[in-house]
Amino acid sequence: MEFPKILFSLFALIFFLFPSPMYAAPGNSNIFREYIGAEFKNVKFSDVPIHSGIEFHFILSFAIDYTTSSPAPTNGQFNIFWDTNNLTPAAVSAIKDQHSNVKVALSLGGDSVGGSSAYFNPSSVDSWVSNAVSSLTAIIKQYNLDGIDIDYEHFQADSNTFAECIGRLITTLKNNRVISFASIAPYADKEVQSHYKALWKSYGHIIDYVNFQFYAYDKGTTVSQFMGYFATQRSNYQKGRILASFSTDGSGGISPENGFFRACSKLLSKGELAGIFVWSADDSKSNGFKYEKQSQALLAIPH
């Protein structure tokens, strides 16, 4: 065999045995994330228990590109729609000073605004991106935030337009060092998935977490059903860090009382638990954040 062929064969063997981290499947991780502030139930960052042995992300819900009075689309000019009486810039600084493992992000979009659906509705890609970069940079700097989450659930633009707008937004904010991470929050709906899968196809390499809304599946989801759903979304968002999730508003999916943690243990054993997120702190306040404590304890166990 000629020397160049031997060298090529050697490199191929090394790549097979020791794949590049860029292409390696994500393993277990100790990231816990929780949405906060959307329901105005006077929940504070300091109310939520925080385990020192994990990485904790609060996600402020929501910033929306709508006017705050008589809500109407603003083409990327974002305004704050979370509980600003309790979740202030000073409160962000205080919780981050108190807990070195805490980061705080904001989520864009959400399901509704002013009692109606919140639509992704850009006038054009360039104008939307320009407005979004400017308005979000101001909010992120004012609140000393670390990242953004994308949670648009209704669309008046095609999937390619959505992909370009959101992809260019994340790219610009990262390049400008305004944020250090970004996540997306799709769920199992045909229109929603078509938009987020288009975004993932073009810009998946700059998206750090997939907060898949497994609680949007039917209420009473079993462990075996959940494992199947999880496998499907790992296929849809290949090489992504897919977080397991539940809601504390009793809406749907697999519940903490009915198998969620057994499912997480199965994912751990397979090296597939990239983290857990919860919707939401507002709903969990009434039960003393019981399942947040259990989630973080599970993630804090060395694996």
Image (cartoon, helix red, strand yellow):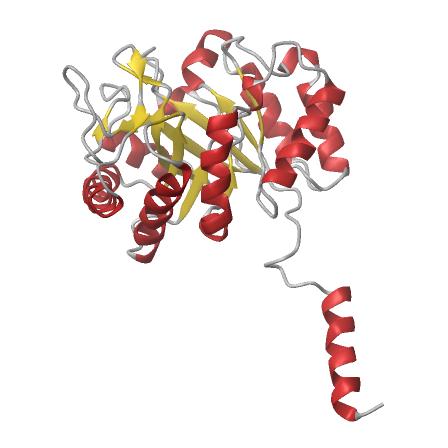
Residue sitting nearer the eye, 95 or 40: 40
Number of numbered discs present?
0
5, above or below 14, in the image:
below
Residue 12 on image: x %, y % = 75, 73
Q: Tell me which corner region of the image, top left, top right, bottom left or bottom right, holds residue 80.
A: top left
Farthest left residue? Answer: 69
Q: Residue drawn 71% across and 17% down? A: 259
Q: Tell me which corner region of the image, top left, top right, bottom left or bottom right, holds residue 184.
A: top left
Q: Is residue 211 visible?
A: yes
96, above or below 19, in the image:
above
Residue 287 on image: x %, y % = 51, 8
**Which quadrant does the N terminus fall into?**
bottom right
Residue 139 on image: x %, y % = 22, 37
Residue sitting nearer the eye, 18 or 153: 153
Farthest bottom residue? Answer: 2
Q: Residue drawn 66% across and 27% down? A: 229
Q: Residue drawn 45% across and 51% down? A: 206
Q: Is residue 33 visible?
A: no
